């Protein structure tokens, strides 16, 4: 079985190529079967491999061929399989399969049905290459592959130019991080002589002491790549706009898998990060800052998908916090549970949008509890997991992160407090969404309820969001074991009760209305804050002023090609002379003769003048 | 030969006059036949200057060059008249300004 893992990314890729070449000629049923079936088959293979691996948990490596050979640089097309890979692959193929199934109903009226599944399958293939890669170069191939697919799918409805704008933004902003990451790979190769991840970490441990400056720079460059891909501060601005794509795409790419690639990268290269404590500190600080920033912003949004997008940014912030404090297992665990409940929430919002004539504004929904029961329960369970209410999957993972953050020497308790504030905000904004959308008076009537292809993935994801916390992920051999001692019990109790308090607040404010916040919101400072948070802390505005507009004005200046003007001048002078001289070429012989005679007279006069002076 | 002793300067003056007349003709005439005639006049003015100079210094070179010029003139006329015929045939005119096809 282990020799066949190369089939797992290959099958979706083949399906993608087929759909690209022949998709427009195939009937919809065949397209759906190819698109969903290929990912389903990959999921099945992953399951079989996983069972095999659990029986004999020995990491293994599979080299297919040497990609290229330049001197000592010989990256192979090689896969590495261990517990971390298995977790990532299960999430990608498992959640991916459910989302593909959901898409068949969501996109059933779309005319570009085949193109959609071609992109989505290619994304799954690229993402699998990313997590299975044995060396950083192959990982980078997958990394860029998912970036391209994200671009294509965000701009899927390209007839609307705003969607194209969002796609370009997503591509360009992540490209900034990717460039830094490429530089990091160059640096690692020049310093360590290999990009093979396992070998590299070994060599790094021999070459560098803890706190080495080169290790720090390399880790910071990798971190920049992760920050771009995972939409963390300061490169997070693309993710809310990326919601322009179809909702299942947001669920798969912009919630469950691609945006967590940065978390995977740092977890995979944790051996390097352990050599650079300052870089780990940077990871933790970026994570917690992003968590809070995005949580405040999510509190103010009214577009259902933007709320979820900011929530995703915020939750990935938690994963970064976990990685930064060395809680690798907790970070990956949260990655997995987040994939379950955030995919659930996104698919639920997709079902609402699908049945409510593409309505995105939560204040125009309301009262959907009885009309769309499956979606309602999906949202209840998803939001409970997102808010980390006890016994849900999100509770187990987030609780671990917070407790381990507390234990971090130095600023641990502060990180814990900030994380708690984030958890409180998470509970408020997620249940604000539930109360506004599903309770109260109905404002828009759904024209249909979800079909089975939507209901089934929602139900399965509901189950996973509930029980996902009891899974034990097989990464104990991948990561170093953290400290086993637990912090004081009161820390744990506070961590549990804060989300409950948040839900209570949301209930009082948004459902019963017993807690009046209008006067607070309508005060001057309240309005200012509201605007500030609504605009995502003005970061888009700031970037627009700092980068986009100067760039546009610069390109406006360069449009007239000022450097070429110098050469243009030479051309212009030559053309002028040419014009004058060609005016003399009249073809009138008498004119030539007259000019010859005139010239002769002038020359003779001069010659006589000179000779008389000389003599 | 002694009785007819014309000073060299006079002959050169006549030669220059002929040259100037020929050149004027070249410049102001439009008919190709007159242009050719003007060319002949200019050639002959040069030949006259050669002959006169040869006689003045008692050298045969001047007459030899005269013979050469005569030949050149004959050849030129032969070619030139051939061209005139062609021009007449093609453009139905002998006016050189009308035969101009250049667009400078």
Image (tube, coloured by chain):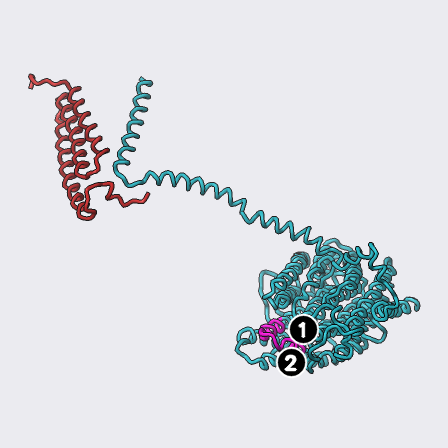
Chain colours: A cyan, B red
On the rendered image, what quadrant is the N terminus of chain A found in? bottom right
Q: Where is A293 relative to A400, above or below?
A: above
On the rendered image, what quadrant is the C terminus of chain A found in? top left
Q: Mark 2 points at which residue?
A: A41
Q: Are marks 1 and 2 in contact (CB under 8 Å)?
A: no
Identified at 69% across, 82% down, the residue is A452
Identified at 19% across, 42% down, the residue is B94
The picture places residue A184, in percent across and down from the top left corner, at: 68, 58
* Residue A365 visible to the viewer: yes
Query: Which secondary structure, mark 2?
Result: helix
Residue numbers of the magenta segment: A101-122
Quadrant position of residue B27: top left
The picture places residue A495, in percent across and down from the top left corner, at: 88, 68
Q: How crowded is mark 1: few (under 14 residues within 10 Å), some or many (20 or more)?
A: few
Locate residue B45 relative to residue A299 in the image: left or right. Answer: left
The disc at residue A357 is: 1
Mark 2 belongs to chain: A
Magenta stretch contains residue A121 = yes
Q: Residues within 10 Å of mark 2 (few under 14, many from 20)?
A: some
Quadrant position of residue A249: bottom right
Quadrant position of residue A275: bottom right
Callouts 1 and 2 on one subunit = yes
Locate residue A573 relative to residue A304 in the image: left or right. Answer: left
Instruction: Name the residue nearer the viewer: A450 or B37.
Output: A450
């Amino acid at each position: 079985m282990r020799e066949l893992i190369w089939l797992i990314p290959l099958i979706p890729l083949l399906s993608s190529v087929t759909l690209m070449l022949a998709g427009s000629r195939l009937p919809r049923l065949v397209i759906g079967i190819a698109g969903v079936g290929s990912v389903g088959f990959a999921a099945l293979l992953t399951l079989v491999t996983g069972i095999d691996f659990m029986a004999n948990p020995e990491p293994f490596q599979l080299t297919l061929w040497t990609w290229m050979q330049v001197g000592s640089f010989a990256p192979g097309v090689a896969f590495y399989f261990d517990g971390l890979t298995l977790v990532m692959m299960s999430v990608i193929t498992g959640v991916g399969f459910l989302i593909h199934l959901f898409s068949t109903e969501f996109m059933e009226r779309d005319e570009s049905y085949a193109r959609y599944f071609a992109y989505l399958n290619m994304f799954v293939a690229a993402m699998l290459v990313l997590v299975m890669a044995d060396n950083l170069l192959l990982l980078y191939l997958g990394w860029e592959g998912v970036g391209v697919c994200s671009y294509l799918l965000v701009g899927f409805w390209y007839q609307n130019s705003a969607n194209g704008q969002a796609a370009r933004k997503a591509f360009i902003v992540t490209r900034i991080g990717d460039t830094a990451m490429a530089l990091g790979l160059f640096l690692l190769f020049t310093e360590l002589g290999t990009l093979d991840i396992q070998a590299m970490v070994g060599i790094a441990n021999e070459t560098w002491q803890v706190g080495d400056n080169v290790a720090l720079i390399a880790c910071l460059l990798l971190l920049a790549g992760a920050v771009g891909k995972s939409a963390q501060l300061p490169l997070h601005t693309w993710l809310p706009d990326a919601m322009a794509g179809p909702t299942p795409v947001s669920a798969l790419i912009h919630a469950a898998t691609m945006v967590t690639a940065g978390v995977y990268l740092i977890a995979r290269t944790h051996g390097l990060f352990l050599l650079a404590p300052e870089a780990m500190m940077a990871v933790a600080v970026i994570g917690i800052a992003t968590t809070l920033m995005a949580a405040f912003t999510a509190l103010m949004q009214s577009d259902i998908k933007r709320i979820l997008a900011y929530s995703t940014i915020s939750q990935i912030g938690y994963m970064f916090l976990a990685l930064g404090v060395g809680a690798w297992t907790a970070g990956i665990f949260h990655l997995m549970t987040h994939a379950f409940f955030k995919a659930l929430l996104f698919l639920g919002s997709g079902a609402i949008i699908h049945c409510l004539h593409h309505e995105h504004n939560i204040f125009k929904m309301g009262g959907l509890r009885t009309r769309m029961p499956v979606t309602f329960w999906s949202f209840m369970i998803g939001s409970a997991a997102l808010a980390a209410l006890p016994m849900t999957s999100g509770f187990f993972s987030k609780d671990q992160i917070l407790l381990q953050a507390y234990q971090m020497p130095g600023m641990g308790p502060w990180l814990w407090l900030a994380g708690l504030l984030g958890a409180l905000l998470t509970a408020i904004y997620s249940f604000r969404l539930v109360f506004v959308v599903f309770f109260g008076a109905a404002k828009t009537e759904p024209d249909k309820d979800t079909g089975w292809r939507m209901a089934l993935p929602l139900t399965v994801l509901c189950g996973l969001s509930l029980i996902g916390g009891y899974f034990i992920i097989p990464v104990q051999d991948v990561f170093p074991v953290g400290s086993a001692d637990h912090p004081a019990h009161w820390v744990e109790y506070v961590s549990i009760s804060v989300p409950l308090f948040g839900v209570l607040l949301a209930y009082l404010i948004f459902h019963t209305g017993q807690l009046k916040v209008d006067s607070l919101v309508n005060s001057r400072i309240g309005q200012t804050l509201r605007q500030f948070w609504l605009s995502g802390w003005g970061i888009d505005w700031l970037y627009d002023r700092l980068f986009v507009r100067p760039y546009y004005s610069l390109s406006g200046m360069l449009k007239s090609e000022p450097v070429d003007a110098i050469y243009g001048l030479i051309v212009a002078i030559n053309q002028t002379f040419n014009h004058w001289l060609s005016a003399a070429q009249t073809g009138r012989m008498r004119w030539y003769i007259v000019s010859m005679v005139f010239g002769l007279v002038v020359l003779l006069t001069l010659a006589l003048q000179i000779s008389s002076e000389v003599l | 030969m002694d009785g007819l002793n014309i000073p060299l300067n006079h002959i050169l003056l006549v030669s220059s006059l002929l040259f100037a007349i020929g050149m004027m003709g070249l410049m102001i005439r439009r008919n190709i036949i007159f242009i050719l005639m003007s060319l002949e006049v200019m050639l002959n003015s040069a030949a006259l200057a050669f002959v006169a100079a040869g006689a003045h210094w008692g050298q045969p070179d001047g007459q030899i060059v005269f013979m050469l010029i005569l030949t050149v003139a004959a050849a030129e006329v032969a070619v030139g008249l051939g061209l005139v015929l062609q021009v007449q045939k093609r453009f139905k005119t002998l006016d050189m300004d009308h035969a101009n096809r250049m667009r400078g």
